[in-house]
Image (tube, coloured by chain):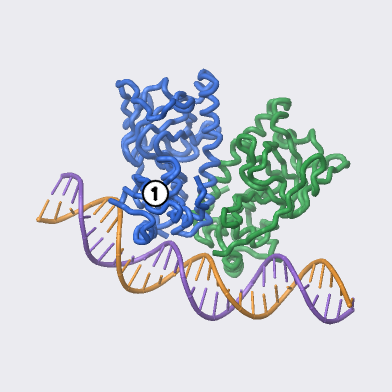
Chain colours: A blue, B green, C orange, D purple
Amino acid sequence: MQIHLRQIKRTAGPPHPAGLDHHMDPPPRLHQEPASPLLSAFSAHRSETLAAGRALFVEGDPGSDIHLLESGLIALSHIQPNGKRMIASFVVGNGVFSLSHDGMRLLTAEALQECRLRRVHRVELSHLPADQAEAVKAALDREPWDIQAETLMHLHKDADEGISYFLVRLAGRLNGPISRGSRVRLDMSRVDIADHLGLTVETVCRGLKRLRSDRVIDATGPHNVIILEPDQLKRRAGLGPDFD
Amino acid sequence: MQIHLRQIKRTAGPPHPAGLDHHMDPPPRLHQEPASPLLSAFSAHRSETLAAGRALFVEGDPGSDIHLLESGLIALSHIQPNGKRMIASFVVGNGVFSLSHDGMRLLTAEALQECRLRRVHRVELSHLPADQAEAVKAALDREPWDIQAETLMHLHKDADEGISYFLVRLAGRLNGPISRGSRVRLDMSRVDIADHLGLTVETVCRGLKRLRSDRVIDATGPHNVIILEPDQLKRRAGLGPDFD
DNA sequence: CGCCCGGTTGATTAGACTCAACGTATGTGG
DNA sequence: CCACATACGTTGAGTCTAATCAACCGGGCG
């Protein structure tokens, strides 16, 4: 079995963790009209940046803050006893995550790219307007179930089906429902995709190549995919063409 | 790909769903000393039985009651668009489950054997003693993360490793930490195990046979396993020998 | 320039699936 | 009581998928 061992740089402790720069600029505007209660909940705090390769937190760490990813890419991972890295999920733009149970982080959050983040502390939730607090709580309740549902699907899909499924879902989270010509930024490496799908790098490559040569997708580069046949892609993912 | 289609009999609606018999006997004693707050939380209600093959609820159903399984076996499953059944988890004795988010069930709970269950309604939680309410809430918070962690492990394990892992974890939930000579009742069918691990029946059979012929386990019948070499089994499961 | 890293491709192998057959326990009707 | 049917578990043979091992490509960078 192919195992990818990886050295994760951990952000140092408070008060000013290495890799976390505090922006003094006014908070950048979120591209969302009108501002949702969920995003508004995070507007009180300035955003921080996290350098690529740094871990925001590591599984087992104490902590229960809630994070909003404004830009960049985060992998939520867990390391097996034998060292094999398993990526439970990726967080992309405007994703909210906490991954905490009983004051402890259950997964590692590592930045795959430089990220901009905002956070609210769990105790602050009660000080927020009711609609914002509700929106955050709803997102947190959904968090483990979303990850669970995706992981379960991948467990029961073969390589090509899993790759198509991954593309459909990622595209959906980036840009909403896919259509002919949708562009998907595949910012994570092939290793990351493999660690997410339970496959090897080579198999991921070949799966994508097959989609490309069958003209279901096109690619201007390894990390830039264009969806040519959305219905075909959904069909190969094991989803009906009416899937949103 | 091998697909197991299955007809699930759904329990009919209130007031007296088919397949649910209301016991008039005094509640049977739980074998647990002293009674934990978690179990006590359910003692106010009489227990119900659910016949084998019946669904307690189906994914998408409204409902958020919390269930305690006193005896029997429940499969928590999800059906893919193509009809393939995926078992996210099994519930065994004294297991607590709800599987609800936003008032809706996210998975189907089907009885694989005749089951005895108790339930508390979500709104009743606030009427319970604080320690009991806390225990139930803690169990519910943990629920999706537990399922998630197991599913993620299985996604990244090959057949034999997954089967060993499944045995270790099931044995642990039935009887606590395993030791030489531990007995494991494997009450679910081979199809159910396959639908849980993302394998075929034949592969499950062969994996168990290999464990048997290597004298890691023994079996007096298809559903009665004895663990001969706990450390070997954990090693094959990808777990250290110090795993609880 | 030469090295390294990430991505890709090819050849081979190992592992899981498919298909088929058979065994065993259980139940049913004659 | 037996004949038969059914469901579940097991085993074997052959096929196919994905992993492994190896090589190569291209870009970024010291």
User: Is the residue marked by circle 1 packed among few (<14), some (14-19), or many (20+) residues within 10 Å?
Assistant: few
Q: Which one is nearer the viewer's eye here, A27 or A217?
A: A217
Q: Position of residue B213 (x, y in %)?
A: 59, 70
Looking at the image, is B146 positioned above or below residue A98?
Answer: below
Q: Is residue B120 visible?
A: yes
Q: How many marks?
A: 1
Please tell me which residue is depicted at 77% across the width and 48% down the height of the picture: B50
Task: State the residue position of label 1.
Answer: A180
Q: Quadrant of residue B210?
A: bottom right
Q: Please tell me whether mark 1 sits on a helix, a strand or a loop.
A: loop
Query: Split into 4 quadrants, where in the image is the N terminus of chain A?
Result: bottom left
Q: Quadrant of residue A198?
A: bottom left
Looking at the image, is A174 positioned above or below residue B188?
Answer: above
Q: Position of residue A210 (x, y in %)?
A: 37, 61
Q: Which one is nearer the viewer's eye here, B76 or A38?
A: A38
Q: Is residue A202 visible?
A: no
Instruction: Output the chain of dot 1.
Output: A
Q: Position of residue A118 (x, y in %)?
A: 40, 27
Q: Quadrant of residue B166?
A: bottom right
Q: Position of residue B233 (x, y in %)?
A: 56, 59
Q: Which one is nearer the viewer's eye here, B185 or B104?
A: B104
Give the amino acid at mark 1.
Arg
Please tell me which residue is depicted at 51% across the width and 28% down the height of the picture: A136
